[in-house]
Image (cartoon, rainbow, N blue to C red):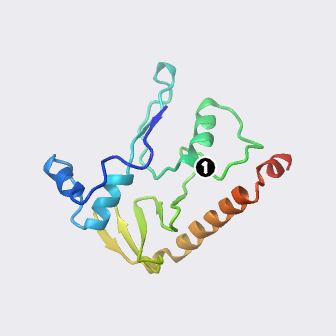
Amino acid sequence: MLYGDHRTFNEGTDDVDVARQLGLALPEDPMLASWLLHHRLAGLIHLPGDALSDSQRSPTGQLDLPRTLLGLLGVSDRGLVTLGRDVLREDGLVAFRDGGFARDNHVCLVTGARGESHRCFDVTTGRQVSAESFAADFAEARARLDASDKIIYGDLVPELRQR
């Protein structure tokens, strides 16, 4: 298994311009271009004999890796304490620590000093779309982050394992 973690390009003041000069196709919107450059990462999973060879294009977070790998190996994830999903069998949302998220072909980013505004994009076209139409997804992302914080800061993993 091979996957990237957070940065696909060195972040800097002219990183988007440099990437474009190197021939990387990025959308015109600078916020979306920067996000795609720094957060859209490839992940590769190789099984012996090229079993289950396929290409999957869906938002995936690190939390999704355990359940996805177990699913590929045919191992039950019953009793596993995880907030992730099997990306090959379940659609879902990937929440970002700042309250933004990715789902399907859309990414919604949090902007402003206090995260008071949002910008959402269709990543296939590069066009901005209405953030209001993603209100339920913003609430789901916030709920997932709250649950994660309660589990981590409350040291609840041992208790959840017993259930």
Q: Residue at x 25, y 68 (%)?
A: 29
Q: Position of residue 69 (x, y in %)?
A: 58, 36
Q: Which residue is mark 1?
A: 85
Q: How many marks?
A: 1
Q: Residue at x 41, y 47 (%)?
A: 57
Q: Position of residue 45 (x, y in %)?
A: 48, 32
**Vertical comparison of 60 with 1: above or below:** below
Q: Secondary structure at mark 1?
A: loop
Please name whichever residue, 73 or 60, is drawn nearer the observer in this view of the structure. 60
Looking at the rendered structure, the kind of residue marked 1 is: Arg
Please name whichever residue, 41 or 71, is drawn nearer the observer in this view of the structure. 41
Residue lying furthest front in this view? Answer: 12
Please name whichever residue, 107 or 100, is drawn nearer the observer in this view of the structure. 100
Q: Residue at x 47, y 76 (%)?
A: 115
Quarter residue 36 falls in: bottom left
**Vertical comparison of 44 with 95: above or below:** above
Left or right: 2 with respect to 22?
right
Kindly tell me whether residue 150 is visible in this rendering: yes
Q: Position of residue 160 (x, y in %)?
A: 80, 51
Q: Residue at x 51, y 20 (%)?
A: 48
Please name whichever residue, 80 or 155, is drawn nearer the observer in this view of the structure. 155
